[in-house]
């Protein structure tokens, strides 16, 4: 029951080379958690940024809760990510040095019922890297299709 919600950011793996992954908590309001449990959230076009040495996620869509009334939340508001200070310092240092960025990979509910987001320290892929990924995916699909026909 607790782990049935798992949203993935498919574009993250296409556009970025993920070097390191972290799991962070998300600071949410009551109506936001209810919308996520109903499966009304999306990670497309989301990104993370640092502000005053704290990590925030921007543009994550969580639909307004149907029965929220006047306490409802704004669907695309900035939300604070909860990490250890050591992890935050490590990420902030890498981002300033080498052209890395922090990318949301997936959103899930853990066994305790808390919403967690998996984020990755990533470097942007070049165009030829993306083409290579497309070629590999197409050749794998073609091999799977051929093997199914032989059965």
Image (cartoon, helix red, strand yellow):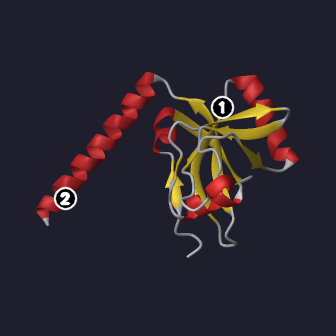
Residue at x 28% of width, y 41% of height: 138
Residue at x 52% of width, y 69% of height: 4
Whether residue 34 is situated above or below residue 75 in the rendered picture = below
Report the residue marked by disc 1: 101
Residue at x 38% of width, y 32% of height: 132
Whether residue 19 is situated above or below residue 109 in the rendered picture = above
Viewed as shown, does residue 74 lie left or right of 97? left
- Identify which residue, 83 or 42, lies in the foreground: 42
Q: Secondary structure at mark 1?
A: strand
- Viewer-nearest of discs 2 and 1: 1
> How would you rate the neighbour count of disc 2 (Cα within 10 Å): few for under 14, some for 14-19, many for 20 or more?
few
Residue at x 69% of width, y 65% of height: 114
Residue 129 falls in image quadrant: top left
Viewed as shown, does residue 145 lie left or right of 133? left
- Residue 62, x across and y down, in percent: 57, 50
> Which quadrant is the C terminus positioned in?
bottom left
- Identify which residue, 147 or 113, lies in the foreground: 113
Report the residue marked by disc 2: 147
Q: Secondary structure at mark 2?
A: helix
Number of numbered discs: 2
> Which quadrant is the N terminus positioned in?
bottom right
- Residue 122, x across and y down, in percent: 62, 35
- Residue 106, x across and y down, in percent: 56, 51
Q: Residue furthest front?
A: 70
Residue 150 falls in image quadrant: bottom left
Chain-order first, disc 2 or disc 1: 1
Measure the C-alpha gap from mark 2 to mark 1.
Answer: 39 Å
- Residue 126, x across and y down, in percent: 48, 24
């Amino acid at each position: 029951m607790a782990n049935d919600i798992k949203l993935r950011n498919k574009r993250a793996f296409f556009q970025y080379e993920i070097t390191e992954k972290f799991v962070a908590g998300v600071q949410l309001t009551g109506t936001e958690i209810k919308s996520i449990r109903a499966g009304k959230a999306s990670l497309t076009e989301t990104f993370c940024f640092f502000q005053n040495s704290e990590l925030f996620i921007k543009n994550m869509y969580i639909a307004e809760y149907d029965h929220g009334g006047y306490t409802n939340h704004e669907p695309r508001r900035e939300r604070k990510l909860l990490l250890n200070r050591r992890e935050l310092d490590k990420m902030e240092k890498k981002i300033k040095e080498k052209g890395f960025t922090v990318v949301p990979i997936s959103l899930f509910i853990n066994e305790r019922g808390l919403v967690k987001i998996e984020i990755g320290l990533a470097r942007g892929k070049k165009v030829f890297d993306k083409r290579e990924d497309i070629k590999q995916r197409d050749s794998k699909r073609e091999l799977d299709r051929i093997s199914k026909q032989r059965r």
